[in-house]
Image: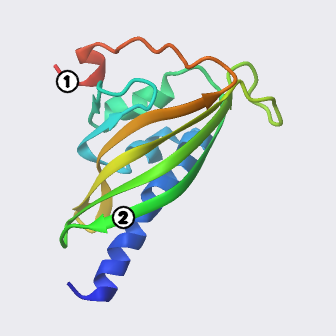
Amino acid sequence: MDPSARLLIEHECGKLPLLFARYADNGDHAALADLFTPDGTYDRPFSPGYPFHGRERIQAIFRDRPPILVRHLVTNVLVEVMGETTARGSSYLIMMSNHDHVTPPQKSNGIFVGGFDDKYVLDGDKWRFASRKGHLALHEGGAIPNIPPPSDEARGAS
């Protein structure tokens, strides 16, 4: 593969985790869901192993939750080009949030550190997530959110 083509793929895929964080923090749930292929999957870091299937189910996770003040810090974004239409990557994530107030500045209810393992595909002329698998590694202050396993129907898995 031409080195400039490889760099372009790395750049385009490397933007996706950053855009995901921006859209999640700003409440742009439709734009967040559009980062995925129509049949893309998303495993939340707080409940891995229960992937949500498809854009509508992914959007609903964020759209239907109570409003929160949240900020995601994304670091260590690595992209490995597998071919002209596929790539994979990983990133670290630090999340801080306040579930009681939505107007900044506020005290965080906790600091959570984890990451994502991603698969990217070229969908038409746009790179998108084929899958995102989140995991939690560390936390400071605040309890880990107790998110019950979602039903297969809610996840679009039925």
Q: Residue at x 50, y 58 (%)?
A: 76
Q: Residue at x 18, y 70 (%)?
A: 83
**Left or right: 105 with respect to 112?**
right
Q: CA distance from mark 2 to mark 1?
A: 28 Å
* Residue 16, percent from left and from top: 43, 57
Q: Quadrant of residue 71?
A: top right
Q: Nearer the viewer, residue 133 or 104?
A: 133
In this rendering, the answer to whether 158 lies above or below 84 is above
* Residue 11, percent from left and from top: 42, 72
According to the picture, the residue beneath numbered tag 1 turns out to be: 157
Q: Residue at x 83, y 36 (%)?
A: 105
Callout in the foreground (2, 1): 2
Q: Amino acid at mark 1?
A: Ala
Find residue 79 and name its label.
2
In this rendering, the answer to whether 117 lies above or below 54 is below
Q: Amino acid at mark 2?
A: Val
| Identity of the residue furthest to the right in this view | 105
